[in-house]
Amino acid sequence: MCNVGGTIQGCYDASNAVINALDALLRDVGAADVPSRYVDGNDALRRAVRHLRDGFKTRNHGLATYDNASFVRGNDEIEQANSELENAWARFPPDARPVP
């Protein structure tokens, strides 16, 4: 949607759907009781998901305002957050890591 051949509106709409899904994920994860051995991984996961959501919001701001710098910054934040997600998986106990 957001690459060559996509539309600004299509990219915005797809990103908005991701933002809504990430908000729902954060609500669900935030409502869970987390055993102590999972707290470190859970905290890292929540930080990464918030960063990912914020990257999509920044990108959508760029799309809505035709601000290429915000669009690029949002994409950079998304890329960074994806790396943080990979690192978050490693923070769970080795015998109980979620499978992405």
Image: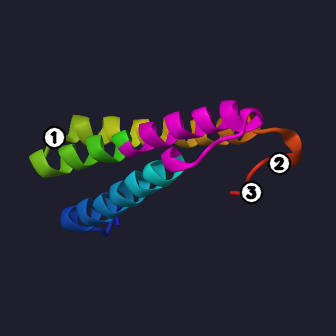
Would you say the residues marked 3 and 2 are in contact, meaning their CB atoms lie under 8 Å apart?
Answer: no
| Image quadrant containing the N terminus | bottom left
Task: Please provide the residue range marked out in magenta.
Answer: 30-53
N-terminal label among 2 and 1: 1
The local secondary structure at tag 2 comes to helix
| In this rendering, position of residue 29 left or right of residue 100 | left
Would you say the residues marked 2 and 1 are in contact, meaning their CB atoms lie under 8 Å apart?
Answer: no
Compute the Cα span from label 1 to label 3: 37 Å
Compute the Cα span from label 3 to label 2: 9 Å
| In this rendering, position of residue 1 left or right of residue 50 | left
- Magenta stretch encompasses residue 1: no
Splitting the image into 4 quarters, where does residue 55 fall? Answer: top left
Residue at the extreme front? 33
Splitting the image into 4 quarters, where does residue 42 fall? Answer: top right
Q: Amino acid at mark 3?
A: Val
Tell me the tag on residue 99: 3
Tell me the tag on residue 67: 1
| In this rendering, position of residue 21 left or right of residue 93 | left
The local secondary structure at tag 3 comes to loop
Q: Amino acid at mark 2?
A: Ala
Residue name at image x 71 percent, y 42 percent = 89
Which residue was labeled with disc 2?
96
